[in-house]
């Protein structure tokens, strides 16, 4: 994966987040503040704008810019969480002009550690971790996994959050009433990962 692939990933992720902005906010209204879609759309649009107009010395520097933009532009809990994720990934890829799948999987594992530390969340608590942890683990265990398989698995992980009871954030106050809706952070995480695997699939063909 080179810098252009990385840009393609984040620009595609932005397009999908813009398309799903209202849906993400609708999900968030059911169990949170109702602003997840608006916040994510604002942050990733700014990321997309910067990637289209700036050049970077390496992938790490690019992802650091992404992190700073998300922290500055995405409100609520999502900005610090996604910002921390990209900041950790940028450190793992510092100085690299391009990276292998295993490099990227390792960087995303560092991002996951950052999310868990910042959000104090573990798997099974109906958060974005319920997509990040199984997907990153699966990719680390099998770096040669097919992209279609990873896209399908990412979707399955997101769907599983519907049956979970929220244990973190504002949604936790609802207790069992949080069961029956998808976690908005898990849905935006699916958009991010499915965009990544789509671009990697295209780059490999």
Image (cartoon, rainbow, N blue to C red):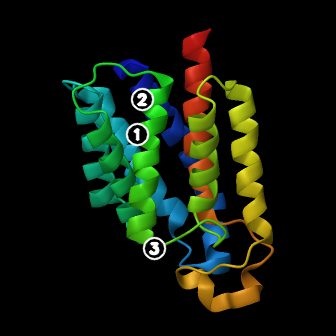
x and y, in percent, of residue 41 in the image = 47, 53
Residue 88 in percent (x, y) is at 32, 48
In the rendered structure, which disc, 3 or 2, sits on the residue that comes first in sequence? 2
Horizontal side of residue 181 vs 44, given as left or right: right
**Tag 1 secondary structure:** helix
Location of residue 159 (image quadrant): bottom right
How far across and how far down the image is residue 25, in percent? 59, 66
Please give the residue where the numbered disc 1 appears in the rendered image.
Answer: 107
Q: Which quadrant is home to the C terminus?
A: top right
**Left or right of 120, for residue 49:** left
At a point 67% along the width and 26% down the height, the residue shown is 145
Identify the residue shown where x is 25% and y is 51%: 68
Q: Pointer 2: what residue?
A: 103
Tally of numbered discs: 3
Quadrant placement of the N terminus? top left
Give the spatial CA distance, label 1 vs label 3: 20 Å
Q: Is residue 42 above or below residue 161?
A: above
Q: Is residue 139 left or right of residue 98?
A: right
Q: Is disc 1 surrounded by few (<14), some (14 to 19) or many (20+) residues within 10 Å?
A: many
Q: Which residue: 35% across, 64% down? A: 80
| Discs 3, 2 touching: Cβ within 8 Å | no
Q: Nearer the viewer, residue 139 or 69?
A: 139
Dot 1 and dot 3 residues touching (CB under 8 Å): no
Return the mark for residue 120.
3
Quadrant location of residue 95?
Answer: top left
In the image, is 29 to the left or to the right of 94? Answer: right
User: What whole-number distance in Å separates the C-alpha atoms at marks 3 and 2?
Assistant: 25 Å
Label 2–label 1 contact, CB within 8 A: yes
Comparing 142 with 75, the one in front is: 142
Element type where label 2 sits in the image: helix
- SS at mark 3 in the image: loop
């Amino acid at each position: 994966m080179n810098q252009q692939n990385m840009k393609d990933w984040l620009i595609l992720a932005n397009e999908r987040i813009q398309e799903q902005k209202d849906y993400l906010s609708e999900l968030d209204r059911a169990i949170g503040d109702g602003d997840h879609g608006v916040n994510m759309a604002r942050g990733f649009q700014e990321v997309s704008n910067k990637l289209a107009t700036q050049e970077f010395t390496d992938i790490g520097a690019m992802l650091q810019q992404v992190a700073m933009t998300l922290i500055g532009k995405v409100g609520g809990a999502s900005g610090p969480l996604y910002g921390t994720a990209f900041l950790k990934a940028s450190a793992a890829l510092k100085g690299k002009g391009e990276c292998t799948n295993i490099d990227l999987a390792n960087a995303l594992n560092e991002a996951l550690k950052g999310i868990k530390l910042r959000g104090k969340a573990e798997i099974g608590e109906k958060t974005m971790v319920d997509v990040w942890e199984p997907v990153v683990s699966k990719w680390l265990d099998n770096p040669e996994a097919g992209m279609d398989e990873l896209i399908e698995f990412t979707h399955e992980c997101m769907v599983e959050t519907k049956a979970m009871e929220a244990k973190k954030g504002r949604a936790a106050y609802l207790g069992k009433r949080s069961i029956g809706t998808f976690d908005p952070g898990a849905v935006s995480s699916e958009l991010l990962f499915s965009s990544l695997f789509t671009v990697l699939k295209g780059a490999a063909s």
